[in-house]
Image (spheres, rainbow, N blue to C red):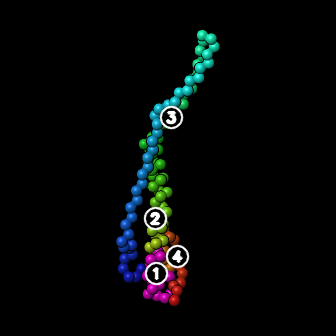
Amino acid sequence: MSGGAMGIKGLSLFTILCVSITVAQNSATNTNCQINGNTANCTSTTQHAPQAATPSQSLEQGYRVGRDMGQPLGQAIAYHRANRWVKKFCKKHPGASWWYSSAATGRLEGTCPY
């Protein structure tokens, strides 16, 4: 790459990732009663709240969310860098063939317009 180090000037990137897992620890109990004269026959059913995630499960979930958000963002930055490099190269070398390769973009190639 000629012309110095590659970089994006003036680009500030802030990513805020908030993962919040809230699990209620209470349960709901429903009671149904049937009254026959002086006798009451009641049945109750209890629905327990789901168990809270363990710390390792929460850590794994946070990792997956971060990875799933970070990969597309990283690729967008990589393609932006490649695009800037191609424009800069083609400005100096109209009609020349070029290729650009990085781990994120793979090999890109083309010909500069005149």
Look at mark 4 in the image and give the residue it sits on: 108
Q: Nearer the viewer, mark 2 or mark 4?
A: 2
Residue at horizontal 60 percent and vertical 10 percent from the top: 38
Would you place residue 103 above or below residue 49 in this image? below
- Residue 89 location in percent, x, y? 45, 83
Q: Identify the magenta region.
A: 82-98
Would you place residue 36 above or below residue 48 in this image? above
Q: CA distance from mark 2 to mark 3?
A: 39 Å
Look at mark 3 in the image and give the residue it sits on: 49
Q: Secondary structure at mark 4?
A: strand
**Label 2 crowd bin: few (<14), some (14–19), many (20+), radius 10 Å:** few
Indicate the quadrant where residue 1 lies.
bottom left
Look at mark 1 in the image and give the residue it sits on: 87
Q: Given the image, on which type of amino acid does mark 4 rest?
A: Leu
Q: Secondary structure at mark 2?
A: helix
Q: CA distance from mark 3 to mark 4?
A: 53 Å
Q: Given the image, on which type of amino acid does mark 1 rest?
A: Lys
**Label 1 crowd bin: few (<14), some (14–19), many (20+), radius 10 Å:** few
Q: Secondary structure at mark 1?
A: helix
Q: Which of the two discs, 3 and 4, labels the residue nearer the N terminus?
A: 3
Residue at horizontal 50 percent and vertical 87 percent from the top: 96
Closer to the camera in the image, 97 or 53: 53
Q: Which of the two discs, 1 and 4, labels the residue nearer the N terminus?
A: 1
Q: CA distance from mark 3 to mark 1?
A: 58 Å
Look at mark 2 in the image and give the residue it sits on: 74
Count of numbered labels shown in the rendering: 4
* Disc sitting over residue 73 in the figure: none
Q: Residue furthest top?
A: 38
